[in-house]
Image (tube, rainbow, N blue to C red):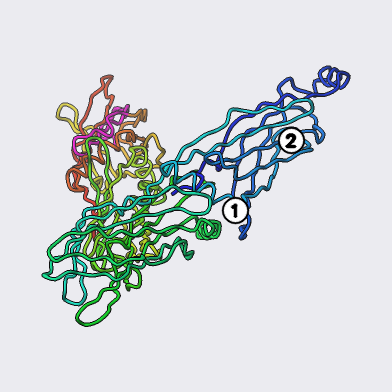
Amino acid sequence: MSLVGGTLGKIATVLVVGMVVTTVGLGAALSTGTLSTTPPSVESIENEWGEVSADRTEIRTTIAVNNPNKVSIPGVAGVSYEVAMNDVTLANGKSGGVGLSPGRNELTLTTGIDNQQIPSWWASHINNGEETTVSISPKIRAVGISQSVPTQKQTFSTDLLASFNSQSGQPVQVGNRTLLTVESTSASWGHATESETPLNFAGTVRNPNDSPLKFSKIGYTVRMNDVTVAEGTTDEGVEVAARSTETIRINSTLDNGKLDEWWVSHIENDERTRLDVQAFAVVETDEGTQRVPLPFLSKAVVFETDVLGGGQATTRAVSGEAGMGFEPPTVETMESDWGASGEDTKFSTRVVVNNPNGDDSSASEVGLDAAYTVSLNDVTLVEDETNATLGPGRNELTFASDVPRERIQRWWVSHVNNGEQTKLRTDSSVRADLGFATVPVELPEREQTFETDMLAGFETTEQRVEIRGRHVATFGDMQSRWGEATFERTPMLVTGEVQNERSRPLEIVKFGYQVEMNDVVLADNATKVGTTVPGQSTRRIETTGYLDNAKIGDWWVSHLENGERSELSVTYYAVVEYRGQRHRVALDSMSYTDTIETNAFGTSGQ
């Protein structure tokens, strides 16, 4: 349940104000250009909690004001605002006599919520169907001017009794004996006042026994965190005839005078509250008088708010039965894998979590908050959060995220520049919310390194160049290595020596190349060499080709679809000018194919 629904926090609204100065001062300022014709304005208002006491909850407000003038404005400006929920004014804040320096100014304003106003707001919230409209009314004042902006309004609602309304079929037992079977439960609010809130809840039960079942009294407690807001017993007993159905009703009353104390606990508990209703019955049996918990009426919800942070409120039903032991969940396995979805890369994590608490435990349903980050070298591929609810026993959860192509491209750059080596790291954190406690769930650490060697096939030391069946030149000592990759392209540096086998000079005009991975063409081009080799001489050549990194995303998807396996094909050719004619010569001995495999989440990679 959100008490202010985040509307106090991060309020960003521009409040334009005209500043009034004397006629002589204005003329002088305008004539010298020191005063802008644009008036100062309030750019934003941000709030955070301050000190909390039994009587007062402090709000610290930072107001950003922009003074477009080139000179300071003396202390003549003031800012104020009012916060109301369902017409109940909770806070007033104002600051006067403020001087403004040129440019951005931050004004600090401290106000407080009178905690005694919380019961009035609570009553209005309940009577309005658990709905509240928060109103923020800001105003700015300057000499001769008082200007308001439209009131900011936001409505939020809660549903605290939803878990009470259910069809159950749950048995209530004492020892091995089934006393009754629950058919349904329900709950409703009565008309709330500033002093009290009626809460009526009931359970329709069936007596499966051959004799009537008598409850001499039914007791109850209602707690919000550690504050007991209602407790008591029914005035009369309840009798359920043999083989018949009856409705057990409990009409409790919340003491709204305790709500200011609860409010303090809510804020100090990081805006988190457990609303807990416990019910029990006194049963006369052949063995004597027994106090029997009524779990079908013992309900609880955990609600959290982010009043000043602007986040959404969350509400989750948990078991209402108290006094039960629990064990924290454990992670049995965590497996991550790649996948391809159309043209995109998908990253998934499968987690098997064991909740050792059975159906009869207060932790039979556990809220799970999980966050995980996956990085390749220094490139963050996935950063995500998810929520789930764990039932008793083994739970299998699958989290999946799409990886933008731009991140795959950046990873490739890091992979090449790191010597074709990648360190894959998965960082995860999981916390289990048991309603009354939040505990960490231990996860195994995951770090894996995989390598590739895409240029390993370029190992030839000699390549004959033949033109019309005549051996005219020999390429020797050929080497290939990666240059410094950028986001746009990956340089492929080729060096070697050319021996002219003939008496006439020849020129190595161009060096051509084509690189394919799984039929994805990463490069298909030629670069200029322009090296002339005199007859019977040797010259060294150097040239650079480039992979188009924009195609890396296409290749990576094909790589994943093929089980992290790629067929690499590298083809080279040379354009040689000899005796006034140019010839394209395939460099078959230098061209090669290879299989590139990775095993990013396995025990080894290659």
Mark 2 closeness class: few <14, some 14–19, many ≥20 residues within 10 Å:
some
Image point (59%, 40%), residue name: 83
Residue 510 falls within the magenta-colored stretch:
yes
Q: x, y (%) of residue 1? A: 43, 49
Relative vertical location of residue 581 with respect to residue 427 in this rendering, above or below: above
Q: Residue furthest right?
A: 24
- Would you say the magenta stretch is mainly helix, strand or loop? strand
The quarter holding residue 580 reads: top left
Q: Left or right: where does residue 405 sit relative to residue 13?
A: left
Q: Left or right: where does residue 339 sit relative to residue 82?
A: left
Q: Which amino acid does label 1 sit on?
A: Gln
Image point (47%, 61%), residue name: 229
Q: Which residue lies under the disc numbered 2? A: 78
Q: x, y (%) of residue 535? A: 31, 31
Q: Left or right: where does residue 53 sit relative to residue 596?
A: right
Check the picture and name the quadrant holding the C terminus: bottom left
In the image, 506 versus 326, the foreground residue is 326
Q: x, y (%) of residue 241? A: 17, 65
Which stretch did the figure color magenta? Answer: 499-526
Q: Which residue lies under the disc numbered 1? A: 116
Image point (21%, 60%), residue name: 205
Q: Which amino acid does label 2 sit on?
A: Gly
Q: Is residue 264 visible?
A: yes
Task: Describe the element under mark 2 as helix, strand or loop.
Answer: strand
Whole-number angstrom distance, CA of label 2 to CA of label 1: 28 Å
Q: Which of marks 2 and 1 is in front?
A: 1
Residues tagged 2 and 1 counted as in contact (Cβ below 8 A): no
Residue 95 falls within the magenta-colored stretch:
no
Relative vertical location of residue 175 with respect to residue 412 in this rendering, above or below: below
Q: What is the tally of numbered marks visible in this picture?
A: 2
In the image, 302 versus 120, the foreground residue is 120
In the image, 287 versus 412, the foreground residue is 287
